[in-house]
Image (cartoon, rainbow, N blue to C red):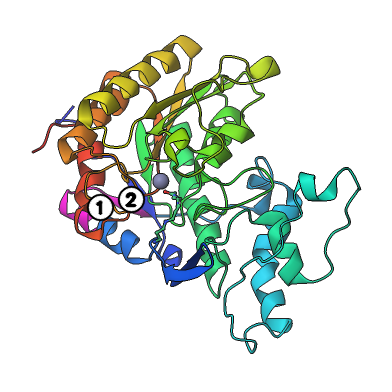
Amino acid sequence: MSREPAVPCVWSEATLSHRPDREVWIGLAMDGSEVPERVSVIAQALRQADHRLIEAVEHPDACLTTVHSEELIRHLSTAYDAWVDGGFVEHGQDRVIPYFFPTEVMLGGIPRTDAASVHARAGQFCYDTMTTLGPGSWEAIRAAADCALTAADLVLSGDARRAYALCRPPGHHATEGAFGGSCYLNNAALAAQALVDGGHRRVAIIDVDAHHGNGTAAIFYRRADVFYGSVHVDPGAGWFPHVVGHRSETGLGPGHGTTQNHTLAPGSGDEDFLKAVRLLAESAVRHGATALVVSLGVDAAADDPESPLEVSRAGYGRAGRVLLGDLGLPTVVVQEGGYHLPTLGSLVTSFLAGREVS
Ligand code: SP5
Ligand code: ZN
C-alpha cells in the first residue's frame, strides 16, 4: 500500500469563494465553522505528503440534474442575486437565510404555489437556518461539484485507481431538492451517479463523516444499484440530522437492503468506529460493487468541535487502509466535514495513506 503512488487530488481555488462568516443556530448568529481555511490547510497537507494536485475541470449543468432537481439548481444559482435585488442587504442581512418553512404539516394537503419573494422561497429549498448563501457561494458550490466529477472522470478513464476530491462546501446533507447542514449540492452522490453512468452497474458509497449523510441516503433510498452505508453519531442521542440516520432505515422498494446505518454513542472511539467501517466494507463487497465512493468527513476526530466522537488520527489511517487498501475497488474519495483546522490536514492525509500513524 505505502509503495503505491500517492492518490491524486482534485481541487479548485473557486471553492474558497464561499464565506459563511456566520450561521444562525436557535436564532443566534454564531461564527461559521465551514470556513475557506479548511481547503487551505488540507491542500497544504496534501502537498507536504507529495500528493499531486489537479485543477477541477468544469462540467456542464446537465451533470447536476442526474441527482438534483432543476428547481434546486435554479434557486442555488439565483437566490443571492434576487436577495440583493430584493433590498435585504440594505435591510441588514447580507446572506440568504430563510425565515419561513412550508412543511407538509403546515400545508395540510392544500397544494402550494411557489413563493413569489426570495425571502419566502428560501425555506422551500433550505431546511435549516445555518446554511447560508452569499456572494461567491454559487461559484464555490459549483466548483465543489466539479471537483467530485473530475475525480470520478480520473477513475473512470483508468488514469487513476483512486482519486480524492477536495470538495468545499461539503455535500452529503443535500437531497434531490433541498439543502442544509452546510451542504448545497451532493458531491458524493454526483460522483456515484457518474460512476453508474460510466458503466459501473453497482456502486457503493461509504460515509465516515461524524454525521449521517441524510441527503445521500435519501437520493439512493429506493435504488437497488447504489448501496449507501454510514457510520455516525447516533441522531437519537440528539445529534444532527436528528430525525433520520437510524439503524432501522434499510431502503425501500427495489432499494430494500441497500441502505445501512451504524450509529455510535457519543464518546465512541477508534474500535467502535473501525468495527462499523469493516462491516460497511463487507456490505459493499456483498452488494457486488465494482466502484466505491467514500464520503470522507473527518469530524469524528477527537478534537473536532462539531461532534462528540473520539476517533484518532491513527483511527482514520486504519479506516483508510480498510477502504482504500483492503477493499481494492476503483474509488473516489470526496471531502465532507471536518472543522478543527490545526489537525484537519493530517487527518485527511493519514486516511489517504491508509497507514497507522500515531
Ligand atoms: C457536512 C457536515 O459535517 N455538516 C455538519 C452539520 C451539522 N451542523 C449542526 C450544527 C449544530 C449546532 N452547532 C452549534 C455550534 C455552532 N458553531
Ligand atoms: Zn459532519
Say which quadrant the N terminus sits in: top left
Q: Position of residue 108 (x, y in %)?
A: 85, 45
For badge 2, the amino acid type reads Gly
Give the labeled residue for mark 2.
Answer: 338
Identify the magenta region. Answer: 44-54
Q: Secondary structure at mark 2?
A: loop
Q: CA distance from mark 1 to mark 2?
A: 6 Å
| Residue 141 lies in the magenta stretch | no
Q: Position of residue 24 (x, y in %)?
A: 51, 66
Q: Note whether 319 is above or below 75 in the view shown.
A: above
Left or right: residue 281 versus residue 85 is left
Q: Secondary structure at mark 1?
A: helix
Q: Are marks 1 and 2 in contact (CB under 8 Å)?
A: yes
Task: Confirm or reject: label 2 Cβ below 8 Å from ligand 1.
Answer: yes
Q: Looking at the rendering, which quadrant does residue 329 occupy?
A: top left
Q: Position of residue 310 (x, y in %)?
A: 23, 39
The number of callouts visible is 2
Residue lying farthest to the left in this orientation: 358
Q: Note whether 150 is above or below 218 in the view shown.
A: below
Q: Residue at x 57, y 30 (%)?
A: 198
Give the labeled residue for mark 1.
Answer: 344
- 131 or 184: nearer the viewer: 131
